[in-house]
Amino acid sequence: MPFIRALARSNQTLLTDRIVEHVFDPLLENNVTMPDSDDSEEEDLTQVDGGKMSKGSRRAVNAIVNAKYVFPSFNILLFAENYIFPQASAKSITESPEDGIDEKNREQVYQLYYKALKLEPEPKHPELTFS
């Protein structure tokens, strides 16, 4: 929440660009729900000997090493709806000095919101809702 508020209220372009680049881009891009994949690639276990790992093992090790920004319970859609959108649609800083948004930053916060919505893939099966 402090980063979103700083992004919305700051009048420094360099700061807002760095917040997006170093906080929100890695957070959103690394927590996309991965579709179920059929990994039917056969491993050549003969390459494991002699200090070489198989492709599947290399992928598993790389996934563990690159899990820097991955949070297992993080939901991009909920984050976008509950935190980014309210800040983007907040009143102007002149109307609400404590919770407002600087008008020149509003478009950048909305772009972050739209990016979060685009990153999450469509579900295979639509949700069942009762009305």
Image (cartoon, rainbow, N blue to C red):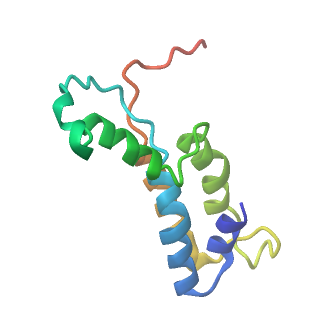
User: Does residue 93 sit above or below 47 in this rendering?
Assistant: below
Residue 64: x, y in percent? 46, 45
* Quarter where residue 88 is shown: bottom right
Between 3 and 34, the one nearer to me in the picture: 34
Residue 74: x, y in percent? 59, 41
Residue 13: x, y in percent? 53, 85
* The N terminus, quarter of image: bottom right
Q: Residue at x 56, y 65 (%)?
A: 23
* Quarter where residue 32 is shown: top left
Residue sticking out furthest to the front: 50
Between 64 and 125, the one nearer to me in the picture: 64
Q: Is residue 70 visible?
A: yes
Q: Is residue 44 visible?
A: no
In the visual, does 122 lie left or right of 100? left
Residue 121: x, y in percent? 38, 36
In the visual, does 38 lie left or right of 79? left
Disc count in the image? 0
User: Does residue 15 sit above or below 87 in this rendering?
Assistant: below
Q: Residue at x 28, y 35 (%)?
A: 56
* The C terminus, quarter of image: top right
In the visual, does 131 lie left or right of 41? right
Q: Residue at x 37, y 39 (%)?
A: 60
Q: Residue at x 72, y 66 (%)?
A: 2
In the visual, does 47 lie left or right of 26? left
Between 92 and 55, the one nearer to me in the picture: 55
